[in-house]
């Protein structure tokens, strides 16, 4: 018996995604003390605390480490379109990254990664 491939999901059944640009505000340059993995971990734990297990599963969060700009301390997070407001609230509750006091704020949202990066992170 031959193995059959799974059919891909129809576009109408796929989860719609949005790209949320965030900015980390701190007194000192955060990049001298903290690496991207630690920032990613802090963002994930902050969202986990606010959203819980089911909320995290529904949100489908993905922190895009390669889209983080260390000079401007801005980056992108991919999430489901229905959970963007919850993600913004979760970012507001993050108060420290790597023993440094920070404020994480939402800069903007886009449906296309290139537009989000060009308009909010790189620019």
Image (cartoon, rainbow, N blue to C red):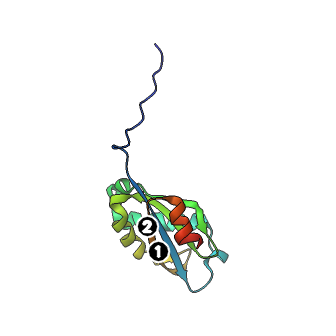
Question: Which residue lies under the disc numbered 2?
Answer: 109
Q: Position of residue 76 (x, y in %)?
A: 51, 65
Q: Is residue 93 visible?
A: no
Question: Which residue lies under the disc numbered 1?
Answer: 107
Numbered mark located on residue 63 in the image: none
- Report crowding for label 2: few under 14, some 14 to 19, many 20 or more residues within 10 A (C-alpha): many
Q: Secondary structure at mark 1?
A: strand
Q: Nearer the viewer, residue 90 or 88?
A: 88
Q: Is residue 114 visible?
A: yes
Looking at the image, which residue sits at the far bottom? 27
Q: Secondary structure at mark 2?
A: strand
Q: Position of residue 108 (x, y in %)?
A: 45, 71
Residue 95 in the image: above or below residue 7: below
Q: Residue at x 34, y 44 (%)?
A: 12
Quadrant of residue 92 in the image?
A: bottom left
Residue at mark 2 to residue at mark 1: CA–CA distance = 7 Å
- Report crowding for label 1: few under 14, some 14 to 19, many 20 or more residues within 10 A (C-alpha): some
Residue 97 in the image: above or below residue 40: below
Q: Position of residue 22 (x, y in %)?
A: 49, 71
Residue 93 in the image: above or below residue 59: below
Quadrant into which the C terminus falls = bottom right
Quadrant of residue 13 in the image?
A: top left
Q: Residue at x 46, y 78 (%)?
A: 95
Looking at the image, which residue sits at the far top? 1
Q: Position of residue 28 (x, y in %)?
A: 61, 84
């Amino acid at each position: 018996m031959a193995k059959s491939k799974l059919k891909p999901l129809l576009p109408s059944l796929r989860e719609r995604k949005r790209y949320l640009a965030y900015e980390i505000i701190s007194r000192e340059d955060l990049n001298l003390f903290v690496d991207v993995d630690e920032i990613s971990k802090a963002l994930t734990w902050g969202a986990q605390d606010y959203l819980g297990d089911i909320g995290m599963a529904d949100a489908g969060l993905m922190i895009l480490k390669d889209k983080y700009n260390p000079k401007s301390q801005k980056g992108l997070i991919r999430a489901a379109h229905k959970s963007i407001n919850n993600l913004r609230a979760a970012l507001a509750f993050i108060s420290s990254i790597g023993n440094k006091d920070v404020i994480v704020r939402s800069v903007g949202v886009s449906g296309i990664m290139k537009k989000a990066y060009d308009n909010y992170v790189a620019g």
